[in-house]
Image (cartoon, coloured by chain):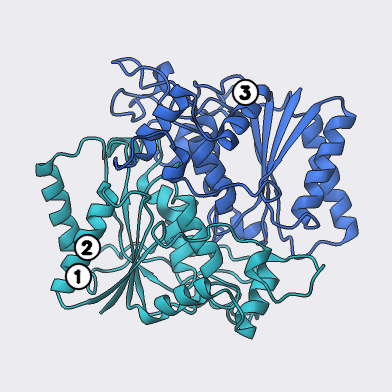
Chain colours: A blue, B cyan
Amino acid sequence: MNVLIVHAHPEPRSLNGTLKDFAVRRLETAGHTVQVSDLHAMQWKTTLDADDSPHRPPGTRFDPALDSKQAFEAGNQPDDIAREQQKLLWADAVILQFPLWWFSMPAILKGWVERVFAYGFGYGVGEHSDARWGDRYGEGTLTGKRAMLVVTAGGWESHYGPRGINGPMDDVLFPIHHGILYYPGFDVLPPFVVHRTGKMDSARFEAVSEALGQRLDTLATTPPIAFRPQNAGAYEIPALTLRADVAPGQVGFAAHVETPAVT
Amino acid sequence: MNVLIVHAHPEPRSLNGTLKDFAVRRLETAGHTVQVSDLHAMQWKTTLDADDSPHRPPGTRFDPALDSKQAFEAGNQPDDIAREQQKLLWADAVILQFPLWWFSMPAILKGWVERVFAYGFGYGVGEHSDARWGDRYGEGTLTGKRAMLVVTAGGWESHYGPRGINGPMDDVLFPIHHGILYYPGFDVLPPFVVHRTGKMDSARFEAVSEALGQRLDTLATTPPIAFRPQNAGAYEIPALTLRADVAPGQVGFAAHVETPAVT
């Protein structure tokens, strides 16, 4: 497979940097082709602004969505954005690897999403009708590709448990899994999460990296999270609420994941 | 009151820019003193990196947390970070105003949080013991201050309803409300959310801005979201899970909000 790792940590000698190097070796040893977007090393431009739409008429009001659409369609996006889009189209699997900062991805990675997932590429794809609300949530430019998060967190696993103070990790990551990855079409694999990173000795690092290695070994075969596709009948359109007979009475993020039939 | 508005939109003539200008006028007319951190106009440095710790010994490994702690304690943080911390200490109320991009705040605002909420200021405050796990989630540097989000979203209100495809807006915003604002001590007010921003004419803008105005008029008195304080008995320490007798059986984000007693 072609694997793209998007890596967001400012220090190459960090736990994150070391796990990224480990992942590259493991994947290449298994015969995969790997590209790494090391955002800090690339000095990635984090902020989406009018400089990303250099061809728009001077003096006009900058519209982040419509100017992104215009630049994408006209093929005059900045090179750094176009290159990352090409890597995404090349990849069979994409790994976003980052430390959890303030319960989300670091700003540099968020800015990668905002700039690379342009209108017409990451959103604003497909037609709207009585039966469809665009190609999104299970359909879109990146359909057929797999994505997985590799996340480190300082807090303990219990802090992210069902009744943990930070909220369940599945819910903390839902806006990324569902809103950023499933939205443009990825099949999203369960995340690989390392907790309590302040307590990392060499024995634990060996165990963590081997556990990551096993997830990488099964990157092509691990079943994805069973998010419900938007346009396959589970949702009313255009309200985009679950039909009454789907997960009846259930509310919140988990309602958007299919539960296996009880047999 | 002293009110700080942190504003994150690249176009001054946008809906967000216009609502920001409206908010400043409304607050000043009511007698409040207002400062605005207009992150794009300030050319805010979005990315947290080793340049934020200019005094650390050359060649050492950059640790985002510990180097932030060292710079904060030694008083040699970059000026832009120290200035924003002073604004936060000055403020009685803080408004974060932004468009919802990919189900979170724009990268430029996330980077403001990451850089300004330094170790020793926004986190890493207070002692850990059998009875306390630091001054956080209801205690901390910003205790006694109020915070409110003003958010615009392209999607419809139903898309963010209890069974809406994007997830309930309260859950989408929980990592910000609870994890970014309640964490360092803010009392967090219910958000002001504008949906379906693509459909905005002057009549609707009048209605929206007047609704915002009413929220600003009651900034000092609106009851905050009743998040459960970490160190007041609701949580086991150090597991930081809800005690069995608190919201028994409930899981997920909503379990961390006190429900009013049924009378």
Viewer-proximal residue among A129 and A196 = A129
Disc 1 crowd rating (10 Å Cα; few below 14, some 14-19, many 20+) is some
Task: Compute the Cα span from label 3 to label 2.
Answer: 43 Å
Q: Secondary structure at mark 1?
A: helix
Using the numbered discs, state the Cα–Cα distance from disc 1 to disc 3 in whole angstroms. Answer: 48 Å
Q: Which residue is mark 2?
A: B23
Q: Chain of mark 1?
A: B
Q: Please identify the quarter of the rendering in which residue B161 is found.
A: top left
Residue B149 percent location from the top left of the image: 34, 59
The alpha-carbon separation of the residues under discs 2 and 1 comes to 6 Å
The answer to whether marks 2 and 1 mark residues whose Cβ atoms lie closer than 8 Å is: yes
Residue highlighted by disc 3: A89
Please state the horizontal and vertical placement of residue A254, each as a whole percent of the image: 48, 38
Whether residues under marks 3 and 2 lie with C-beta atoms below 8 angstroms apart, the answer is no
Mark linked to residue B27 = 1
Q: Secondary structure at mark 2?
A: helix
The relative height of residue B122 versus residue B99 in the rendered view (above or below) is: below
Amino acid type indicated by mark 1:
Leu
Where residue A157 sits, quadrant-wise, is bottom right
Viewer can see residue B153: yes
Give the residue at the far left of this rendering.
B203
Q: Where B19 sits versus B95, above or below?
A: above
Check the image and report above or below for A184 versus B139. Answer: above
Q: Are marks 2 and 1 on the same chain?
A: yes
